[in-house]
Image (cartoon, rainbow, N blue to C red):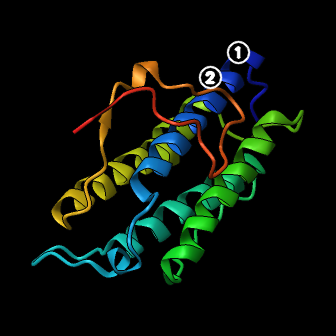
């Protein structure tokens, strides 16, 4: 069990807010057909990737609670998976914001489920471009991101690039 200092938990919460911000960009305004977009010889559709990301956050929360469990979920429709993304990341963030003990170090939580989620959000952004629905780039250093900002209504990007 970890008695992570508040600074480590806050950094982990800021990381989650960053994942939520970047994830929101990758999934916002995607057409429903995007969920089933396929590339030759590429096994995961965007819907499967988003379901996997959602499974990662459920896993992360189970790790925090000391009851590590993994579940490979069957992807739901795009809208349901988008809702699941925000509710899952919020549940994880709520746990981190509480005084409940972490049953794993923040570093291990980052290197496992959080880093994996960032990788897959990048895949979604790439697939958006390949599906002719690109996400505009932006200077993420300038983004208005703060711990606890993990909902679907992320702040508007400061400056987007084509």
Q: Is residue 111 above or below residue 121?
A: above
> Residue 96 location in percent, x, y?
76, 37
- Residue 14 placement (x, y as % from top left): 61, 28
Residue at the (77%, 18%) spot, across then down: 6
Q: Position of residue 70 (x, y in %)?
A: 58, 67
* Label 1 secondary element: helix
Instruction: Give the residue drawn at x 60%, y 55%.
Output: 57
In contact (CB < 8 Å): disc 1 and disc 2: yes
Residue 125 appears in the picture as rendered: yes
Task: Using the image, tell me which numbered label, if any, was put on residue 11.
Answer: 2
Marks 1 and 2, how far apart in space? 6 Å
Residue at point 74%, 23% (across, down) = 4
Q: Could you say which disc has been placed on residue 41 in the image? A: none
Q: Considering only vertical position in the picture, is 27 above or below 157?
A: below
Label 1: which residue? 7
Q: Is residue 108 visible?
A: no
Q: Quadrant of residue 123?
A: bottom left
The part of the image, by quadrant, that contains residue 36 is bottom left
Q: Quadrant of the C terminus?
A: top left
Tag 2's secondary structure? helix
């Amino acid at each position: 069990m970890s008695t992570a200092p508040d600074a480590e938990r806050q950094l982990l919460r800021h990381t989650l807010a960053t994942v939520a911000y970047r994830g929101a960009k990758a999934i916002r305004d995607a057409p429903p057909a995007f969920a089933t977009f396929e590339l030759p010889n590429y096994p995961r559709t965007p819907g499967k990737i988003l379901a996997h990301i959602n499974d990662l956050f459920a896993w992360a929360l189970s790790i925090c609670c000391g009851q590590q469990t993994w579940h490979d979920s069957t992807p739901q429709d795009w809208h349901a998976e988008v809702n699941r993304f925000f509710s899952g990341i919020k549940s994880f963030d709520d746990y981190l914001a509480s005084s409940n003990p972490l049953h794993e170090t923040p570093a291990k939580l980052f290197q496992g489920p959080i880093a994996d989620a960032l990788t897959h959000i990048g895949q979604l952004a790439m697939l958006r471009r390949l599906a002719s629905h690109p996400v505009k780039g932006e200077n993420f250093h300038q983004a208005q991101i703060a711990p606890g900002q993990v909902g679907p209504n992320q702040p508007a990007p400061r400056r987007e690039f084509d």
